[in-house]
Amino acid sequence: HMLVASLPPLPVRLDGARLPLSPERLQDRLRLLEPEDAREIAQLFEVLQWSRQFAEQTDRAVAQRYEELMREVANPVIREVLTVVIDVRMVTTALRLRRRGEGPPTVGIGQWFDQIRRQYKRPDFGLGFAYPRLAELGARFEQGDVLAVHRGLLRGTWEFLRKRAEGFSFEFEAVVLYVVRWSLILEAQKVDERRGRAAFDALVTEALGEYANVFA
């Protein structure tokens, strides 16, 4: 109760959201957890951090590490949340591969892996029932609007987690869902920063033309 009450409210929408507390302050609040709960939150953070880089790792290493991490997670809500996050990462990885003209992913993680491989050439990988805007986002990805697509997938994940959190108040699961949504705000801010840098670079290139990269 003390921990949940000490956490500042999260915004309703992801768009334009700012972290309600810093990483240091969040870690400080999480020290109120019992040791067993603290270990589960640590496992949650480990999977979240790992999943951001798995597209750049070797196939075998990815599958092995995913299985290792998920074996350590016992809480059903944490497993549910991580499954959602991993599935979005898998879809994003498949979009990247397809845009580069490569074949379907060979990393067998997440519940949509087989579906993506079977329906790789379809705009939405045949996953429109789960991600209604995926065909639209996929088309924007093909056009090079990568950051917008990333943001759209984050927004969909946010809405799922926000609705899921409505079923909890002062339980440990409320802390889990808070931490994951907090991490999505952090990631969305990084996307916005990259978008801002890209916009600035475009303006510089437009203004300076052939001289834009002289001092790069």
Image (tube, rainbow, N blue to C red):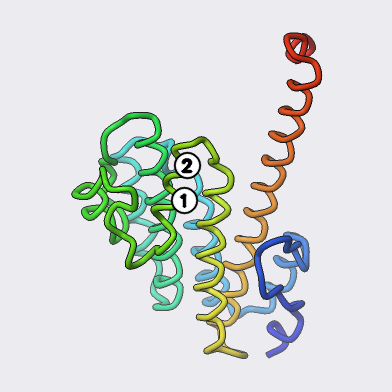
- Indicate whether 19 appears above or below 56: below
Q: 71 and 53: which one is in front?
A: 53
Which mark is on residue 141? Answer: 2
Dot 2 lies on which element?
helix
- Neighbor class of circle 1 (other Cα within 10 Å; few <14, some 14-19, many 20+) is many
Q: Residue at x 36, y 36 (%)?
A: 97
Amino acid type at image mark 1: Leu
From the image, which quarter does the C terminus lie in? top right
Q: Is residue 5 above or below residue 195?
A: below
Please identify the quadrant where the N terminus is shown. bottom right
Residue visible at 22% across and 49% down in the picture: 119
The x and y percentages for residue 174 are 58, 82
Which residue corresponds to the image point at 73% horizontal and 40% vertical from the top-left?
196
In the image, what residue type sits under mark 2? Answer: Phe
Q: Position of residue 62 (x, y in %)?
A: 35, 44
* Image location of residue 2, percent across then percent down: 72, 87
Q: Disc 1 versus disc 2: distance between alpha carbons?
A: 6 Å
Instruction: Specify whether 1 is left or right of 21.
Output: left
Q: Is residue 109 left or right of residue 147?
A: left
**Residue count near mark 2 (Cα–Cα under 10 Å), binned few <14, some 14–19, many ≥20:** many
Residue 163 rendering spot, x and y as whole percentages: 53, 80
CB atoms of marks 1 and 2 within 8 Å: yes
> SS class of the residue under badge 1?
helix
Image-quadrant location for residue 175: bottom right
Q: Residue at x 76, y 62 (%)?
A: 18
Name the residue beneath numbered marker 1: 137
The part of the image, by quadrant, that contains residue 3 is bottom right
Q: Is residue 115 left or right of residue 168?
A: left
What numbered label is drawn on residue 58?
none
Camera-side residue of 210 and 108: 210
